[in-house]
């Protein structure tokens, strides 16, 4: 085989691999264009021993391909202190341009957060509590898995008034 033929075949293979790699890179970028929002936020129970907040976590797929959420792991912090962990390991399929709703309950003990909560409760009640959602969402698209970081902070008042709704 001639040297020029070997070089041509090598360049063809490299070009093909490069194109495939670029395609998967672009798909990973598109996978990160998910839209997140919270709705239906309500305080289900509030006592000195237990607070339960119910909410719906909406994830919208802005892409033309299906996206599978393979896991969702979000730590919830109330007034800067760890309160609970929300974890979903069941597969959730989101169709193109569709919204999927994941119902969640955040349950924590106010006694565990007593030092941080006393000033908030004295200053206006539970509506002013800051809630931080920090974690990652693992998605799978075209057989490739990606971790998408998530880090947002709201007050309960903001969530109940719709500030947890993203613009998309």
Image: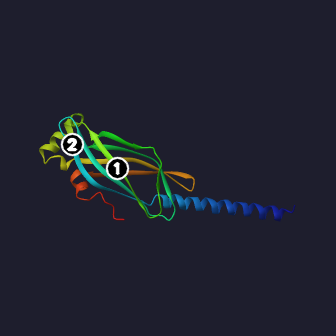
Of callouts 2 and 1, the N-terminal one = 2
Q: Quadrant of the N terminus?
A: bottom right
Q: Foreground residue, 79 or 137?
A: 137
Q: Residue 33 carries which label?
A: none
Residue 152 coordinates in the image, percent (x, y): 33, 52
Task: Residue at 58%, 59% (x, y): give it.
Answer: 24
Q: Quadrant of the C terminus?
A: bottom left
Query: How crowded is the residue under tag 1: few (<14 C-alpha within 10 Å), some, or many (20+)?
Result: few
Tell whether 45 sits left or right of 67: left
**Mark 1, residue position:** 103
> Helix, strand, or loop for circle 1?
strand
Task: Residue at 54%, 60% (x, y): give it.
Answer: 27
> Helix, strand, or loop for circle 2?
strand
Residue 94 coordinates in the image, percent (x, y): 46, 57
Q: Foreground residue, 18 or 87?
A: 87
Q: How many labels does the image show?
A: 2
Tell whether 154 sits left or right of 1: left
Task: Residue at 33%, 61% (x, y): give it.
Answer: 166
Tell whether 7 sits left or right of 163: right
Query: How crowded is the residue under tag 2: few (<14 C-alpha within 10 Å), some, or many (20+)?
Result: few
Residue 90 coordinates in the image, percent (x, y): 46, 45
Q: In this view, does 87 lie above or below 146?
A: above
**Mark 2, residue position:** 45
Q: In this view, does 103 lie above or below 161?
A: above
């Amino acid at each position: 085989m001639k040297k020029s033929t070997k070089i041509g075949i090598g360049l063809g293979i490299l070009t093909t691999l490069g194109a495939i790699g670029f395609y998967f890179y672009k798909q990973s970028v598109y996978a990160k264009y998910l839209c997140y929002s919270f709705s239906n936020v309500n305080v289900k129970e509030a006592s000195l021993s237990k607070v339960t907040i119910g909410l719906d976590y909406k994830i919208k797929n802005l892409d033309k391909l299906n996206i599978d959420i393979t896991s969702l792991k979000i730590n919830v912090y109330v007034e800067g202190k760890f309160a609970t962990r929300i974890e979903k390991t069941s597969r959730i399929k989101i169709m193109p341009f569709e919204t999927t709703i994941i119902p969640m309950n955040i349950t924590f003990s106010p006694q565990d957060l007593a030092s941080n909560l006393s000033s908030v409760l004295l200053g206006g009640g539970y509506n002013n509590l800051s809630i931080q959602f920090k974690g990652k969402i693992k998605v799978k698209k075209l057989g490739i898995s990606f971790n998408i970081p998530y880090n947002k902070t709201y007050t309960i008042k903001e969530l109940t008034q719709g500030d947890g709704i993203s613009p998309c």
